[in-house]
Amino acid sequence: MSKHERWNTLLELLAATGRLEVEDAAATLDVSPATIRRDLDELAEQRLLVRTRGGAVPQGVSYELPLRYKSSRHASEKQRIAAAVAELVHEGEVVGLNGGTTTTEVARALALSFGAARPEASPGAPTAPALTVVTNALNIAAELAVRPQIKLVVSGGVARPQTYELVGPLAAGVLGEVVLDVVVLGVDGIDPGLGIMAHHEDEAGISRLFAERASRVVVVADASKMGRRAFARICGLDRVDVLVTDTAIPSEAVRQLTDAGVKVVTV
């Protein structure tokens, strides 16, 4: 197991249990206690946890894994979800993407589908973009900026280091001036009664504005998000047109979503 994989696992265990003991973590990962101590020390230097005598506890009261340490979770499911979403997008459309690991995979799938070179237009004729993407995620913008066939619009705002998302009045000001054909939203929780949710109110507010500006709202989430609640509500299920998820979603959840008018696509 590589150091990156160990760190992913340690942070996930910490998020799930609220505390790590060196001996227990060493047994779980099948490595020496000395290796775990070094890992915890390095993670503490990055302010991702707080070292304690014999282990570690989360950094702060509310704990959320940074995006760079979440990318390996449910990776194959997210890639299948992204490929399915790319098939729902049509050439020439304006697509909104908020931040997150699943929407990052969607951005990559869109780049593969619409980022290839196109036939040359007649001399002097303007070339319309294959796709226009509007995003508040810095990492998504960095991946799409090198795709000349994709017109990229990035909101302003204050960057959240956990998710690379731009939030606040500057981001809202830009999004308030655009019209989207479809928005693809990554979320932290989906509840049949409460709708879709995010961990932080500033991110939820920007995602809500994305949904308000779009003709179609597509939510992308692996099955682990079903039935999970998060702090800040984005919108109700009545605003969601399609949920793209994996086949592990419980049949009862599919029924509840379908009854709420959401089309469920499983991959």
Image (spheres, rainbow, N blue to C red):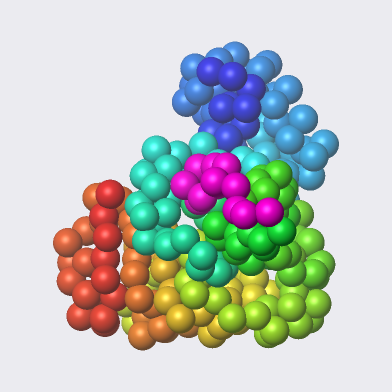
Residue 114 drawn at (x, y percent) = 51, 50
Q: In the figure, residue 251 lies in which quadrant? A: bottom left
Viewer-nearest residue: 229 or 52: 229
Where is residue 71 drawn, in percent x and y?
Answer: 55, 41
Q: What residue sits 58% from the left and 27% below the top?
A: 6
Q: Position of residue 100 (x, y in %)?
A: 57, 55
Snapshot quadrant of residue 19 = top right
Q: Which residues are magenta?
A: 110-123
Q: Is residue 124 left or right of residue 31?
A: right
Residue 151 sits in which quadrant?
bottom right
Q: Residue at x 47, y 26 (%)?
A: 28
User: Who's the residue at 82% across and 36% down the image?
Assistant: 45
| 89 lies left or right of 179 | left
Left-right relation of 23 to 222: right
Give the camera-side residue of 143 and 16. 143
Assess whether residue 7 is covered by the magenta stretch. no
Most extreme residue toward the front, as rendered?
123
